[in-house]
Amino acid sequence: MPKEREPRRVVLDPDGPVLVEGPVEIVMEDGSTVVFDRFMVALCTCRRSRDYPLCDTSHRRKTRGSAPGKLREE
Ligand code: FES
């Protein structure tokens, strides 16, 4: 008798990626598929990632901090 499938947990970050419990298989826009065998996969929703479809934290805005020349993330 087949085991019941458990729901896969997906966490939405309103200012960042979608976190999906891995492993995941992603169908890209060109029809190709990529498989990520990680425990948790962060999928980019802002399209700024240089590692798309994975989030590389490029969604974080950088602003000038109080210290000269320093950037801080918001
Ligand atoms: S959501 Fe993080 S880089 Fe796009």
Image (cartoon, grey):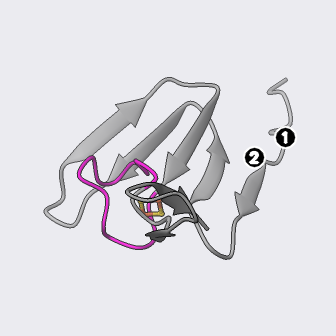
Residue 41 location in percent, x, y? 55, 40
Above or below: residue 37 compared with residue 30 = above
**Residue at (84%, 40%) from the top-left corner?**
6
Q: Is residue 47 magenta?
A: yes
Q: Secondary structure at mark 2?
A: loop
Find residue 6 and name its label: 1
Residues under numbered marks 2 and 1 in contact, where contact means CB atoms less than 8 Å apart:
yes
Residue 8 versus residue 42: which sits nearer the camera? 42
Where is residue 63 drawn, in percent x and y? 48, 72
Q: For this rendering, which residue is in front, 69 or 37? A: 69
- Reading the image, the residue beneath label 2 is 8
Left or right, 34 with respect to 38, comes to left
Q: Which residue: 18% across, 49% down?
A: 32
Quadrant of the rendered structure where residue 11 is? bottom right
Q: Quadrant of residue 22?
A: top right
Q: Amino acid at mark 2?
A: Arg
- The amino acid on which the numbered mark 1 sits, given as a three-letter code, is Glu
* Ligand 1 location (quadrant): bottom left
Q: Position of residue 42 (x, y in %)?
A: 54, 47
Residue 19: x, y in percent? Answer: 64, 51
Identify the secondary structure beneath mark 1. Answer: loop
Q: Which residues are magenta?
A: 44-57
Alpha carbon separation for disc pair 2 and 1? 6 Å
| Most frequent secondary structure within the magenta stretch | loop
Image quarter in which the C terminus is found: bottom right
Q: Is residue 54 left or right of residue 2?
A: left
Q: Quadrant of residue 16?
A: bottom right
